[in-house]
Image (cartoon, rainbow, N blue to C red):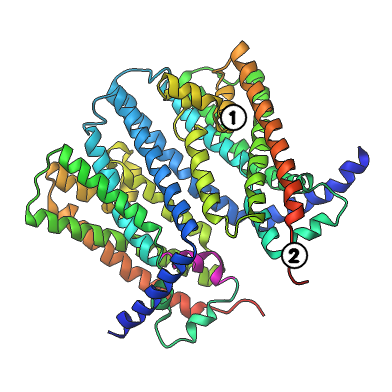
Amino acid sequence: MRKFFRIYQSFTKAGVENAMAYRTSFLCFALGESLYCFVMYFIWKAIFLSSGDSSFLGFSMTDMTVYVFLSNLVGFLISTDSTDNLAEEIHDGSIIMRMIKPVNIDYSILAFELGNKVMVITCIFLPVMVGVEIYRYVTLGYVAFQLGNFLLFVVSVIFSYLLSFYLNLIFGYLAFFLLNIWGFSILKSSIINFFSGALIPLAFFPGAVRLVFEQLPFASLVYVPTMIYMGKYTGEELAFALGKQIFWLLAFVGISRFIWSLAQKRLAVQGG
Amino acid sequence: MRFFRLYKTFVIQHIKKLMEYRVDFLTGAMSFFINQVTNIVFIGIIFSQIPKLQGYLFYEIIFIYGFSLIPKGLDHLFTDNLWKVAWFVVRKGDFDRYLTRPISPLMHVIMETIQFDALGEFIMGVILVVTASVKLSLSYTPVSLCLMMIAMVFGALIFTAIKIIGAAIAFWIKQSGSILQIFYCMSDFARYPATIYSSGVRNIITYVIPFAFTAYYPCSYILRGNGPLFCIGGVVAAAVVLLAVSLVVWSQGLSAYESAGS
């Protein structure tokens, strides 16, 4: 176990250094991407003003604001570059450098990305979360933050991240079989965007559609952790949501291992 | 004249590339389509609960949304290469190449890429605007049609000017992609009526980074009959001013440019 940490620690360290080197660029990028939250905030404000009702399909204005900003944060926490990085390594052949080392390929990429997540958590997640909680306190008049929900959220986000990681890894491995995966990579992001509840809470979809969407692995990515944070899930529903996350995670790990074993046989690195 | 002859050569190269990477083009176009469907479903869900959004009907919102895609798509089609300048062409020192050619570097950068994926944006925008016009039974006169076209073209130039400024910043700081990203993402505010925003935001998108002129104001002329002098004239004025600023910034940047790399 100690050996395990010693080996992968160096990958994490490299990840932190990489994140620090590109921090300004990354933070500006994140700011740009987050502007859309403000557009959504104003739209929801207009919706609630127009409807004159304090609830929209069971969500209050405060709920919606929290949902918009939090789902965006979850998006940052679970984002991973594994598809593009892996595809690039496969194309230029540098993947061989991973294969000749006595390390597991998934863990070495994961450990590297962990370094990046340290920055996302300290520079983006914590400040925005504090902002959201201040907003909730001001609009509701009491502290809505619940430690229990927060801890469950942390667990759920970790599952989400791993799920997102393995899903992206599978797409990355496709580079072994396809010439160019750029198009598929973009397509994957838009599918995830729609089905994960990043823009529209899945609860807003009509009965049957909603039921189907909630079972898909994409719902486990953004929707589930966000709903847990907001305390919308309790008891059985909560256990079921977490169970689904674990189920999909195991399934994706299995698929990625399977593809990797097939892909290794096809690998042909040119030049040297 | 020479410009068009050159451009034709570039376009032919692009069509060859497009044929080579058909699958990429198709998946790219499909993902764009899914993104648009997501947004339209969202608008649909809103209107399943309320009849009007701050006085706007469903198809009026669709009209503005569709309209916003047209200038954005036009600019995206022709000037996508500016993103590369902002992200890595300058940083890697590859910009030297443009300086050695006998045409203006800016022209060369713009000519070099035609992003056919952007046709998805453009066509989707046209479909939405036409559908909404029919459903709202809008009546166009030759004058209003002309003004609408003018607004689309100059709206696209607003995007182009902002991208030129964003890309030119790279001449000083080597990599300006993320700064350009912030500017560009502000165009998301243009998709919906500017009246839903607080006055601060509204003033920014009207007078500072005038994306509101790329969709909301021209649409308010067509949908609400608001004064064309401000609604259409404003687009032209904003585009001309920004374009002039962007050319100055670009040429300043060029003289500040020091090649990177070894």
Q: Main secondary structure of the magenta part?
A: helix
Which residue appears at 29% of the width and 28% of the height?
B47
Q: Is residue B210 among the parts visible in the rendering? A: no
Mark 2 and mark 1: Cα distance apart in space: 36 Å
Residue B199 in the image: state x and y as whole percent: 31, 41
Task: Specify few, some or many for label 2: CA neighbours under 10 Å numbering under 14, 14-19, or 20 or more.
Answer: few
Q: Which residue is mark 2?
A: A269
Q: Which residue is mark 1?
A: A220
Residue at mark 2: chain: A
**Does B232 appear above or below A270?**
above
Task: Specify few, some or many for label 1: CA neighbours under 10 Å numbering under 14, 14-19, or 20 or more.
Answer: many
Q: Which residues are magenta?
A: B80-91
Residue at mark 1: chain: A
Q: Is residue B224 among the parts visible in the rendering? A: yes
Secondary structure beneath dot 2 equals loop
Residue A260 is left or right of residue A73, and the answer is: right
